[in-house]
Image (cartoon, coloured by chain):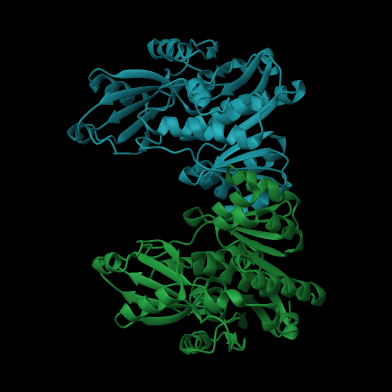
Chain colours: A cyan, B green
Amino acid sequence: MSKPTDVTALGSAIVDVLGAVDDAFLLTHNIAKGVMTLIDEHRAAQLHAAFAAPREVAGGSAANTAVGLASLGASAHFVGRVKRDRLGAAFESSLRETGVDYRTPPADLGPSTACSLIAVTPDGERSMNTWLGAAREFSPADLRERDIAESAVVYIEGYLWDAPSAKQASLRAMSIAKASGSKIAFTLSDPFLMGRYRNEFLALLPELDILFANEEEAKALFAADEFDDVLQALKSSSAIVALTRSEKGCVIARGGEVHVVDAAPVERVVDTTGAGDQFAAGFLYGLTRGFGLSHCGHLGALAAAEVISHYGARPQVSLKTLAAAKGLL
Amino acid sequence: MSKPTDVTALGSAIVDVLGAVDDAFLLTHNIAKGVMTLIDEHRAAQLHAAFAAPREVAGGSAANTAVGLASLGASAHFVGRVKRDRLGAAFESSLRETGVDYRTPPADLGPSTACSLIAVTPDGERSMNTWLGAAREFSPADLRERDIAESAVVYIEGYLWDAPSAKQASLRAMSIAKASGSKIAFTLSDPFLMGRYRNEFLALLPELDILFANEEEAKALFAADEFDDVLQALKSSSAIVALTRSEKGCVIARGGEVHVVDAAPVERVVDTTGAGDQFAAGFLYGLTRGFGLSHCGHLGALAAAEVISHYGARPQVSLKTLAAAKGLL
């Protein structure tokens, strides 16, 4: 896999806006505790104004994976749409400071930059209010063919299927990747997406080189009652499929080949946000370095363990240093 | 697998002698708490006499598996040596009352019947003091060729390798099984045995149809650092290998085929004694009924979950009724 870029990730460009609040704030602002609620632009602006000292960090599933890849020392590139506005600039600078290459031109028209207003209460619960804005308008025009062709892996988040133009951009990226010998990696993103796109995702499977899914997503995709049914359904697939199972570790399948890899130890699980994203980062890093599947699984497990041991969806330490210390590099 | 007997199990015929004691008893009698210590006949008699109201139950790993098989409704037969003494008679009646067929003639000469004096303290800890006695003298002369030939499966415990004549009996049973089309199942029994017989067990592997091992035993057998190394080492083996992983469930491998099966839920783990023995019972039962490997794994997991939810190494309820209630029969 020797191309100028290790991984180009396509996803929703969302700014996480974190505010420390008390429970009264949730009541006053009618925020459902501990869940993700989609909101409109007006409400996003209201909540943003109500946060005292909000902290803004580039977020979004695939962008977080790109951050993890950069932390491991990979060359990672992110493609996703923001608007030319204050949050758009915040997304760009926050992502670039991690070492991720981000050059998608901000849109001059259309909805404002996407943001997720995350109200963090003293008990550590995160209540998310997400405005998808410009991220939903991501379209084939945002892609540069050469960027895709020059990436060893193109990584696409399933969330993009929820916006027609973003889905078209994803399919276009896949077709460029196929033509230029880049590997196609895909994540199922959320079990609820199977309700809407199960058949589309099943039809996509033969096109994929790498599929990421957690246990719930994989069961939903194959309409399986139990994990082993998923594993048996995958026997006829030639893709590398990385199935994550929280504390049960992960199972990596490729055709008939199966690897069972334990979770990395975590002293205390603080916030599971981003576990899947960082697993994908570690796993893809291993693949781009030509490591075996079990080794890739361990790298994914280590990155996931790091991110769930603290608040926030980005690694807090250099994953490269961490992986080296664990003898994985 | 249609033969008159489903499973003939070969193992150490040991009477478990349970005594409720306090911690002072352990000190007075110099008993190491929570572990298994081998003792001699004299000390066995002393401790037995010191127990107030001892409860005697036929035990031993393979015999417990036979009990589990009978509880599932299989025809199970046990072969192992006791002496013609009071405990020998206790072993025979205690085993027969479970429905297990036991006809090995008691020895008139040699050491007394094996027993494990289990001091149970109020905290639930079990301190075992085992006298192997007559069980170690189990020899090819104790086998009836026809019993082996008429069993669909012959199940042998690795513990028998610790006594030369018992090992010879095991090898003889395997050779009869091979000649008569009976399947050979083997359990590694204890990680410590790998230190003594690793190469012998590896050489045995191609002769086996079914191998049972917990994770520690399997790692020791293949000198593997991690579980996935075991799985990869097994790719070239044609045996069905059932690898148990405590709360992580089990993995069943046969050549390249791999099944990952979850542990059955347990409200509270009370005493893990006998988990592996009952797993083997459930799994073998499934095989004799022609069930798929994943189905067999679920039966094993269910039987193991039942036995660890209470004190003692025998099921407390009918495993057949339990399995039926869970939709596994």
Q: Relative to residue B219, is residue A42 drawn left or right?
A: left
Give the percent coordinates (x, y) of residue B260: 59, 54
Give the percent coordinates (x, y) of residue B208: 73, 64
Q: Nearer the viewer, residue A19 or A45?
A: A19
Q: Residue lying furthest right in this view?
A: B179
Q: Relative to residue A268, is residue B58 drawn left or right?
A: right
Residue at horizontal 47%, vertical 87%?
A: B90
Up/down of B196 relative to B313, above or below: above
The part of the image, by quadrant, that contains residue B225 is top right
Q: Relative to residue A303, is residue A144 drawn left or right?
A: right
Up/down of B206 relative to B184, above or below: above
Give the percent coordinates (x, y) of residue A154: 64, 24
Residue at horizontal 67%, vertical 38%?
A: A240
Q: Nearer the viewer, residue A108 or B209?
A: B209
Q: Relative to residue B50, is residue B273 drawn left or right?
A: right
Q: Nearer the viewer, residue A14 or B279?
A: B279
